[in-house]
Amino acid sequence: MEFIDLRSDTVTKPTDAMREAMASAVVGDDVYGEDPTVNRLQEMMADLVGMEAGLFVASGTMGNVVAILTHAGRGDEMLLGHLAHTFLYEGGASAGLAGVHPHILQNEEDGTIDLDAIEEAIRPDNVHFPISRLLCLEDTHNRCGGAAIGADYLDAAAQLAHSHGMSVHLDGARLFNAAIALGVAASELTRNVDSVMICLSKGLGAPVGSVLCGTRTFIDRALRMRKIVGGGMRQAGIIAAAGIYALENNVERLTEDHANAARLAAGIDAIPGLSCTSHDGSKIPTNLVYFTVDGASIGNPALDANLLSQRLREHGILANSLGSSNQMRMVTHIGIDGGDIEQAITALRSSLEET
Ligand code: TLP
């Protein structure tokens, strides 16, 4: 069976044109800094986010942990939201590899963290406390419904952190989704943060890689940290070429993914027993569609997110269940068109009608 894969925007496969760009890439040994394609990708991304330099890394997780290793030392503390990807889904890398103590604050529904809560959490200078060194933010915010967070909040949070001598790292795995949804340049969102990690292998459709950006000095230090975690790659231009292709061709088209997500969300909301939480008007939505499954409300208490996910698979639709919370996620991307959205909505309806 040919599946419609809505589990994530990480599932995209390179198109023929992207593969051609990869096949013809000029390469060199990037550990010597001699891969012209990697160098070009790093410069392009740094320009797009208005920063001095970029560093190609194997994944978003690697980019985040390299940033943490560069900003903070063992026993230092980083402040981040309880729904941050770095906190939930990166294998505890900040503690395990960087020895950095995570101090968790409540995420608001729109992905932000209350500024007063941040200020209150910053430790005074006292030998009993870890040193509050880093604030980590996420835009778009994955677990907060893929919400796009605007520049005003990011500027204010960065100013607050800086006034206490802290640095700010932005997990911008889907930064271009945020920029497109907000109708601003990516550099407007990053103008006051100290580092940002952007993924090429999500909505941008490249098979591998992320870029970490910051000042020249920061990136020089991050280069050493990337080497330590085994991220020094050699003829990486082969994959960097896909990233360049993605930046040149796949940024503006993210609007299509957002429109498809909005159609999907509206379809889901019209189905009794389902309610969309990512497109409920409380935040700026992008390509992630989160919804809750309430089987009891339609007289079918046994129907939960896990069962619905299994039934959808039988209808040829792949979607992730978030398990106990009875939440599900569907993600639109370059491999999904309007027809797929209609099929997904029909499959959801049929799955809910089955007893
Ligand atoms: N997110 C993946 C899963 O890990 C949950 C997904 O399917 O959404 N930051 C954010 C905000 C992310 O959503 C992800 C991946 C990462 C970092 C990590 O990127 P990779 O998978 O390249 O390590």
Image (spheres, rainbow, N blue to C red):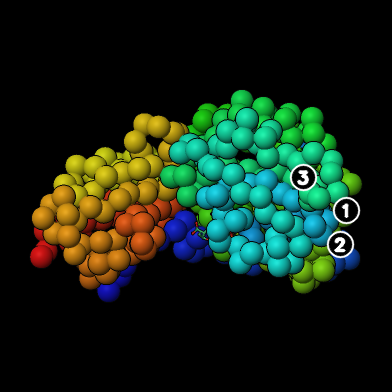
Gap between marks 2 and 1 measured at Cα: 7 Å
Classify mark 3: residues with Cα within 10 Å, few (<14), some (14-19) or many (20+): many
Disc marking residue 220: 1
Residue flagged by tag 1: what amino acid is it? Asp
Gap between marks 1 and 3 measured at Cα: 23 Å
Expressed as whole percent of the image width and height from the top left, the position of residue 68 reads 75, 54
Disc marking residue 224: 2
For residue 351, side relative to residue 8 (left or right): left
Residue assigned mark 3 = 132
Classify mark 2: residues with Cα within 10 Å, few (<14), some (14-19) or many (20+): some
Residue at figure coordinates x 89%, y 65% from the top left: 32
Gap between marks 2 and 3 measured at Cα: 23 Å
Residue flagged by tag 2: what amino acid is it? Arg
The answer to which quarter of the image holds residue 116 is: top right
Residue flagged by tag 3: what amino acid is it? Ser
Instruction: Please tell me in which quarter of the rendered image ligand 1 is found.
Output: bottom right
Q: Residue furthest bottom?
A: 1
Q: Is residue 237 visible?
A: no
The answer to which quarter of the image holds residue 87 is: bottom right
For residue 52, side relative to residue 114 (left or right): right
Say which label, 2 or 3, has the lower sequence index.
3
Residue at figure coordinates x 36%, y 31% from the top left: 281
Tell me whether circle 1 and circle 3 mark residues in contact (CB < 8 Å): no
Classify mark 1: residues with Cα within 10 Å, few (<14), some (14-19) or many (20+): some
